[in-house]
Image: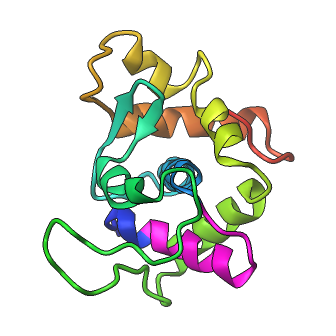
Amino acid sequence: MAYPSLAIANYFIDRGASEKDFMDPLRIQKLVYIAHGWYLAVYGEPLLKEKVQAWKYGPVIPSLYRNFKVYGNGPILDPALDLESFDVTIPQVPEDDTKARAVLDRVWELYRPYSGVRLSNLTHQPDTPWHAIWSQRSDGKAKIPNDLIQNHFIQIAHERPRKAPAQ
């Protein structure tokens, strides 16, 4: 099942807060993107309802950017709210979605030690989906196709099956 990016962000915000490991906007942006990539690779379907865009500084989910830009590079202290729909509920991944939660748990386990800058560097490598799209069209509005993201994460899985995945 595909979710709003804010629901996935809230998973990582909650998980980080429970472990005293607070998220910042850059780190949350990259963790949500990476979770989407692994979900595509494992299940062949998108985790996110939204499309990822190629911006100057890497893959970006615009709704996450808009929601968290007020934090600058500081810690995110509150859950994400859907500001565009004026919905006051907090988007979340349901407890019974074991597929999504398994991927999110694994992404957290593997990428938790990485800072936002380190995660950003991983997503900017020459052979990444962001680079492929950015090098063709650098206006910051180009969508990164899910099949490109999926193939990239499948390739990572085949190249590094026993280590923390690096891009």
Give the number of callouts. 0
Image quarter where the C terminus lies is top right
Horizontal and vertical percent for residue 49? 28, 58
Asked whether 35 or 155 is in front, the reply is: 35
Residue drawn 40% across the image and 80% down it: 92
Residue drawn 34% across the image and 68% down it: 3
- Most frequent secondary structure within the magenta stretch: helix
Q: With 107 as the anchor, is 56 left or right in this view?
A: left
Asked whether 164 or 69 is in front, the reply is: 69
Res 98 → quadrant: bottom right
Q: Is residue 46 visible?
A: no
Seen in the picture, residue 108 relative to 30 is either above or below; the reply is below
Residue drawn 37% across the image and 40% down it: 146
Residue drawn 44% across the image and 77% down it: 79
Asked whether 64 or 122 is in front, the reply is: 64
Horizontal and vertical percent for residue 54? 37, 29
Q: With 21 as the anchor, is 85 left or right in this view?
A: left
Q: How is the image coloured?
A: rainbow
Horizontal and vertical percent for residue 67? 33, 61
**Numbered range of the magenta stretch:** 8-23
Residue placed furthest toward the left: 85
Q: Is residue 155 magenta?
A: no
Seen in the picture, residue 160 relative to 142 is either above or below; the reply is below
Asked whether 57 or 105 is in front, the reply is: 57
Horizontal and vertical percent for residue 114? 75, 49
Res 126 → quadrant: top right
